[in-house]
Amino acid sequence: MPPSKGYAALNATSPLAPYGFTRREPGATEIVVEILYCGVCHSDLHMARNEWGQSIYPLVPGHEIVGRVTALGSAVKKFKLGETAAIGVIIDSCRHCAPCNRGEEHFCDEGATLTYAAKDRVDGSITMGGYSNNYVVDERFAHTVPANLSPAAVAPLLCAGITTYSPLRHWNVGPGKKVGIIGLGGLGHMGLKFAHSFGAHAVQLTTSLKKKEDALKLGADEVILSTDPAAMKAHAGTFDFILDTASAPHALEPYLALLKQDGTLTMVGLPEKPPTVAPFALIGKRLSVAGSMIGGMEETQQMLDYCGHHNITSEVEVIPIQKINEAFERMLKQDVKYRFVIDMSSLK
Ligand code: NAP
Ligand code: ZN
Ligand code: ZN
């Protein structure tokens, strides 16, 4: 492979800056994808700044990738040259354990390989993400993209989309259910769109009242300012399910008080400082606090096809890669409508 170009963090405090590296040649079942767009996930920021203590530098973030297939291994069946392909948060797994055989590669017993800052199973190199001009991936870990959807607005589906679609499906969100989404950011706005599309009574919980009109347009039946105790009290004990996408530390108790008996709050947000839960907030109504992580390859393709049928994409602000550090700062200020997507032609 010719040298690749990207943007990398060199340590936990340095801004992202141009970085050159090489990717290995594609194997028989692998494809080379020229990256057109890459979404900016809050996980990219947590990882660039080593907030979870697992970062490896230089770190090229990016796991919401849409691009064009520019080379194919000899045994590739799923793609043809020039087709659009999408890559998400994982790019490999053991491929033989029970979860992998069920198409739940994200739960691989041996640990799935992440798109960046992970050890590549093929050559032991450290994976470099999608804030770059190309990617090499096995066709099993790449997805086809419905032709009717805009590639830039599809990119966030590869993480924000599947991370919200999967738990809403798993906990049977649909007609007759009152469902809350905590946080109107990249994940939250996709969760809101899916909850609405699945026929639930969708309620946006937000700390930013200025997002109210947008939430209503995106599919919310109601919007609650979560910092207003009276507004929260008015909804006490009425929710079946809550999806928590908040990226910053927050107390769970005010949200748990919204659930009905046997209700569930599922966390997908991963704040640097994990929340604590008072058992008294759970026992009185036999509540559950759960967690969910992205989704497997099969469900990711189902989600993309669902989005194609229902014309669902992300609300995006397309930026050149030179604006990535500014985008990170705006994300920290909850100033994203509702996902930054990098136009990778700006790398040239
Ligand atoms: P984002 O676009 O920055 O959105 C996060 C939203 O959280 C904000 O817009 C804000 O919404 C809300 N928020 C921030 N601080 C809050 C607080 N103190 N209390 C309540 N709400 C608060 O981030 P994202 O890309 O959606 O990612 C969200 C989180 O999910 C991150 O921690 C990320 O690492 C994690 N994540 C997990 C998975 C997984 O597989 N589980 C996958 C991807 C991302 P309002 O302004 O509406 O309050
Ligand atoms: Zn992500
Ligand atoms: Zn496995």
Image (cartoon, rainbow, N blue to C red):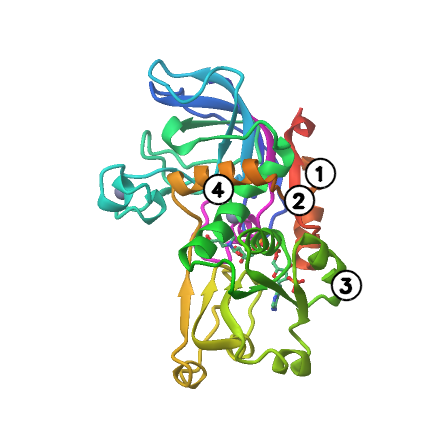
What is the three-letter code of the residue carrying label 4?
Met
Residue 103 occupies which quadrant of the picture?
Answer: top left
Q: Are marks 4 and 2 in contact (CB under 8 Å)?
A: no
Is residue 38 found inside the magenta-colored segment of the image? yes
Position in image of residue 34 (x %, y %): 55, 23
Q: Residue at x 48, y 59 (%)?
A: 173
User: Is residue 206 rendered to the left or right of residue 82?
Assistant: right
Closer to us: 300 or 8: 300
Q: Is residue 62 in view?
A: no
Q: Please say if the residues under marks 1 and 4 sit with CB atoms less than 8 Å apart.
A: no
Work out whether mark 4 precedes mark 3 in sequence or the reverse, and give the earlier one.
3
Q: Which residue is mark 2?
A: 340
In this rendering, the label closer to the viewer, 2 or 3: 3
* Magenta residues, start to end: 35-58
Task: Name the element at disc 3.
Answer: helix
Pointers 1 and 3 in contact (C-beta within 8 Å): no
Q: Of the numbered discs in the image, which one, if any, rests on residue 319?
A: 1
Task: Work out whether residue 305 or residue 249 is closer to the camera in this orientation and state it.
Answer: 305
Q: Closer to us: mark 1 or mark 3?
A: 3
Disc 4 beta carbon < 8 A from ligand 1?
A: no
Label 2, residues with CA under 10 Å away: few <14, some 14-19, many ≥20: many
Task: Choose the circle earlier in sequence order: 2 or 3.
Answer: 3
| Residue linked to disc 3 | 210
Task: Between residue 250 and residue 217, name the one nearer to us.
Answer: 217
Circle 1: residue type:
Ile
